[in-house]
Image (cartoon, coloured by chain):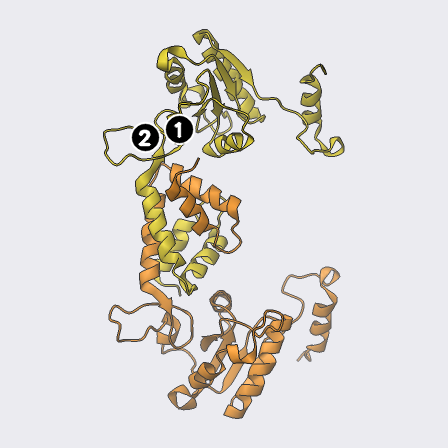
Chain colours: A orange, B yellow
Amino acid sequence: VLPTHLQELITLLSRLPGVGERTAQRYALFLATGRDDLCASLGESMGRVAHNVGSCTRCGNIADRPEDNTTRALCSICQDTKRDPSLLCIVHRVQDLLSVERSHAVRGYYFVLGRLLSPLEGIGADQLPVEELKQRIRLNDSEVQEVLIATPPSVDGEATALLLSQQLKPLGVSVSRIASGVPHGGDLEYADPVTIGRAIAGRRDIE
Amino acid sequence: VLPTHLQELITLLSRLPGVGERTAQRYALFLATGRDDLCASLGESMGRVAHNVGSCTRCGNIADRPEDNTTRALCSICQDTKRDPSLLCIVHRVQDLLSVERSHAVRGYYFVLGRLLSPLEGIGADQLPVEELKQRIRLNDSEVQEVLIATPPSVDGEATALLLSQQLKPLGVSVSRIASGVPHGGDLEYADPVTIGRAIAGRRDIE
């Protein structure tokens, strides 16, 4: 019943994360029946993102692709010379980088892994960008003194943190890990035993 | 922190139904960081839908926009001459039309209202396409004999059905309403009292 162009749009939309056939149809019908020009605007916007937005060649964050193809893309964080070059924060995904940035707790630079070690999904150590990370740390005559591993406190995140710590310590940097415990505003009554266990194991003296 | 083009995409995506800032950012980052060309394909697909897909000038369903601007757009259902011209089914939205079509229970034609009477949202009788509907019924020397009102069994849907019934009966057509009751596979134990009440009020003799 639906026009071919619309059916095609539904198929493409259902490739977005968490979007099934039904949600994709809902979006497509909304776009096709809308009275304003959202569909055209969104199409043009995606075209611009596809052509102008890429990955930062230094840290893997989202970055504007340079007009000329000779210069390498650098994100706004890597371009910011006022940051602390001694601290490098390692995250899993760009989303995580944005979350850490919102906390204003890291004034250093970042490195986006893109994936975590995952035996279940068949992702081994050779599929992690360990060499790129080592190169990044050696950049600028080793200004990096501390590597803060901010991968999630999950099985895969912990395994990745352990692997990276083993690989990076020989470079002469100190390696730290974000704390895991009861979240701010969280209730001990509803916290899971692993979180409680971590909060207790990671306890600190009150000064 | 995010490039302007990406921020712009997030703003546009958050205008989709049920999509907030957070989901929009999730979609945008997925599109911007994806290794395949989904972002570009989706952009082109939306452009095609914006330019080639419009509304059927007869029923309001989704329809291919004709190449020349002189012919009026007609959807695949209105173009289908094998359907029963004596039955006209009135629905709220295109999504509802597609649901009714999937049931194969209506072999007539459709009319999409686009909105329901809603005192709460300030939508009055003058904002419903009543004149267009009357014109549609008078089309082809009044082949329409029965108007089946398939607006949802909600307060707004019932009010709309009542209004349309009053407006259309003087045209000499019979006006019917879809049944409301316990859905197929539904459990009486969990059905709400209004649904049970309707199922009993709408009971039919077993032949």
Which of B162 and B202 lies nearest the eye of the viewer? B202
Which of B53 and A203 lies nearest the eye of the viewer? B53
Q: Is residue B89 above or below residue B93?
A: above
Q: Is residue A90 above or below residue B15?
A: below
**What quarter of the picture does the C terminus of chain A occupy?**
bottom right
Q: Are marks 1 and 2 on the same chain?
A: yes
Q: Residues within 10 Å of mark 2 (few under 14, many from 20)?
A: many
Name the disc covering residue B73, or none: 2
Which of B54 and A46 lies nearest the eye of the viewer? B54
Q: How many marks?
A: 2
Q: Amino acid at mark 2?
A: Ala
Where disc 2 sits, the SS reads loop
Where disc 1 sits, the SS reads loop
Residue at mark 1 to residue at mark 2: CA–CA distance: 10 Å
**What quarter of the picture does the N terminus of chain A occupy?**
top left
Q: Amino acid at mark 1?
A: Gly
Q: Which residue is mark 1?
A: B60
- Is residue A39 in sight in this rendering? yes
**Subunit of label 1:** B
